[in-house]
Amino acid sequence: MKEDGTILRIDQVKKYYPRGKTFLGKARGYIRAVDGVSISVRRGECLGLVGESGSGKSTLGRVLAGLERPTEGKVYFEDLDLTDIWKKENSGVRTKLAMIFQDAYSSLNPRKRIIDILTDPMRYHRICPEKDLYQEALRLLTLVGLHEDALGRFPFEFSGGQRQRICIARALSLRPELIICDEITSALDVSIQAQILNLMKELKEELQLSMIFIGHGLGAVRYVSDRLAVMYLGKIVEEAEADRVFISPAHPYTKALSLASPEPDPDKRREASLSGELDPEIPETGCSFRPRCLLADESCRKASMDLVPCGDVPGHVSACLKGI
Amino acid sequence: MRKREEKSSSYIHMIFQRFRRHRMALSGVVILVLITGAAVFAPLLIRYSPLEIVGKFSAPPDQNFLLGTDQSGRDVLARLLYGTRTSLLVGLLATTLSTAIGILLGLVSGYFGGILDMLIMRFTDMVMSFPYILLILVCAAIFEPGLKSIILILGFVDWPGAARLVRGNTLALRESNFVKESRLSGMPRRYLLFSEILPNTLAPVLVYATSVLALSILDEAALSFLGMGVQPPDPSLGNMLNGAQSLTILTSKPWLWIPPGLVIVLLVTAINFIGDALRDALDPASGGGSL
Amino acid sequence: MGKYIFKRLLIALPVLIGITVIDYLLMTAAGNPLDMISGARVSEAAKAVRAEQLGLNDPIFLQYGRWIWQILHGNFGISLKTRQPVSEMILSHLGPTLLLMGVSLLISFLFTIPFGVYSAVHQYQAGDYLIVGFSFFAMSIPGFFLSLLLIYIFTVRLQLLPSGGMMTLGGGGGFLDLARHMVMPVLVLSVSMTGTNLRYIRSAVLEILGADYLRTAQAKGIGRFRVISRHALRNALIPVITVFGMEIPVLFGGSIIVEQIFNWPGLGLLTMSAILSRDYPVIMAVGLISAVIVLIGNLVTDLLYALADPQVTLT
């Protein structure tokens, strides 16, 4: 796997949550948060994961980080099965993988100064000699655009954007190879969002990071991503080069998402093509997007949701048989 | 117009509340400092030893003995100050012990969950099912009564509340992002438990500990009153009241039993005031006493 | 509902078993029953025979099993002190204690519910301060000190009430006599619960008064009194149930000291004299019985919850 530069590979991953319990604790049914996803991330690449809330993208992110065990399927980080990452002998590998969360407020221990938040993990993993820890923390802080005086302060003294920068610095502190960003801009003001997006893009290029960037706005995710995967109800419905997905989406859902992203020019404003809300009651057979799709007809009732190549662009796959 | 009225009245309310809170907590602190100070500096404040026989038996208060003397001719004031010392010591140590046990069990229970959690919580239920005083009395009957055993007994009986509190907090904190991040970056368990989770549950635990402190002081007093706690001749606030079980002392020598009783009431009230103010400061939503 | 009760019982069962184990272990830690039964003068050989008879050489779990078996048949052993069956002693002392506890519980609730609600409704007014202040006092005064004060005032100074016992010796007895004997112990026990109750009910009602649905009701023009009596009180029932559950163990503990001081011939007095004379079979039985009563109290609380709050059944 390493030869082709793949850093993370997942194979038919499913994550089901039991819904409602019978008296003996058996599940009455399941929410299929992630329902058979296969995807890989190459070294130095940023993969964007897009979808509405409830599409399973954040669950997938947690599974990818090893925070949750997949119900089925395997996740490989480099050559290591991710479920093994919690074993003692693999603790070194864990530093190669970092995660940044949406809620920067609960991501920093409120009782700790920034300096400790940054240096504690570095000290434990012996990233650098004790005497250089301060310099290293300072370097990280500068990297994310904060000043030295931040080091002595507590998290509550910072704004949301600044906190997210600290979280990024923390994620970088162990020199990871892959960072999973779970909607890291969603809770921020629009202007701050752009700053953080720019920062991530810079960092990725400067540090040669591999990233998984999860978000619900197609535009924002596209900005930092090399490749995009669109999720709907636990399944990937389209995957391609980031620009390709944006410019010529093949799946009606992707199209709807791209239309939903803000367009500053009122003359160019387009009709929304998405009706209804995401409903976890997935149709048992056929295309799960069918109930909301404007193009749906009888044939969609029996359609499989396998990804098939569309057009002549290599690497562009879609789950829609209409193949627009 | 109406709106402005409402605003100003709620503002007055706020000031009122703040004043009330501060006044209560402040008076609590003053009382506590006075009593603790008198107890700690007792040797400097008082000429007599609490154990020495210095006067007539059961003499009423006079200039020499401000609170009179007890049945053996010892100075009641000296015994009161030294007894307060003992009671404070027992309360503090027992509270420290029980809180430490509670924190440890709560952390383990909340963090690891599963069978361990179930076992610890069921055990907590069991300990809580025994009437508290009865459990203490039984323990006191088993072990040799005395200062050390009363501290240990109170300490080992009083932990369930703290354990439940810490467990609840730990359950919530375990799911917080910063703990997840630490876990992801391969930090060891002891770091997660003691450096990430514990500091964030300490404040509510400390508030809870104030009520445990108040209870421990009350329990020590009750036990010593019943003759199963601190043993004479060493004075404690509780065993000074022990003599009042006899009707003659109760009837004709009130200086022997009213002062230690009042000190207990004052001490415990002060601690409860402080605890209440701390609770409000910590959780503005509780008790409607938002600041 | 049936399922819920069943589930609760299922949880209570291991706790009950655990309680018996703790009880048994505590007593085994307390000392060898042989030394308790026999004096110092019994020879070692006789002791060994007796130990064999009593099965003291068997493994501890076997001994525990035998003990439980006896208890399930209502046999709590023989008192070391009075040589009476423990079960008889307990039965004869249970009545006065339940009477004392029941009346105290009733009086405490009769007092705390209206005052707690009043305090919450009139938050930060003079009455509220008075009630909150009283609750602090009630929480902070040791029961035994209050008892002594009451005896000092009502018996010694005013000579109004008897200092102890349940009935006047040789007197005609009757309800009035009993009531006169009960005033002070009931007062002390009630006060011991009052502090917590008042504060709990007050803050619970405050929380309910701040709830959105009440604002809605008020906005609809329903009068303040009706809002409180019809809407708030029904929901305040739940905290009252909670308090009820919390008070049962407190009552048991309190009654030990109160009965001791007022010489009330109940379970507490029996316990205290058993503890002082190290009468372990009696202590064991009282510990077990009170723990079981507390457990039943908790169960009842849970059931009342389920009745008062429809949401509970679902969880």
Image (tube, coloured by chain):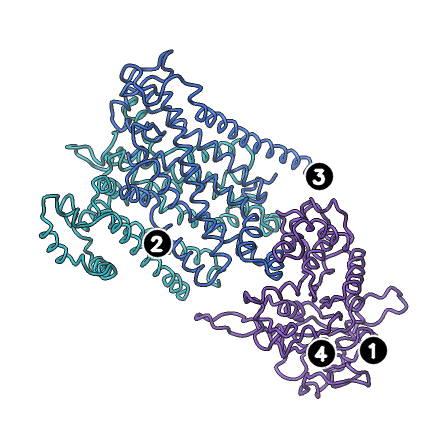
**Label 4 Cα crowd, 10 Å radius (few <14 / some 14-19 / many 20+):** few
Q: Secondary structure at mark 3?
A: helix
Precedes in sequence: disc 1 or disc 4: 4
Dot in front, 2 or 4: 4
Residue wearing tag 1: A248
Q: Position of residue A174 (x, y in %)?
A: 67, 59
Respond whether the residues carrying marks 3 and 2 are from the same subunit.
no
What chain does mark 1 sit on? Answer: A
Residue A3 has which mark? 4
Q: Position of residue C54 (x, y in %)?
A: 15, 57
Distance CA(mark 4)–CA(mark 3): 75 Å
Respond whether the residues carrying marks 4 and 3 are from the same subunit.
no
Respond whether the residues carrying marks 1 and 4 are from the same subunit.
yes
Dot in front, 1 or 2: 1
Residue A35 visible, this orientation:
yes
Residue wearing tag 2: C295
Chain in blue?
Answer: B
Residue wearing tag 3: B2
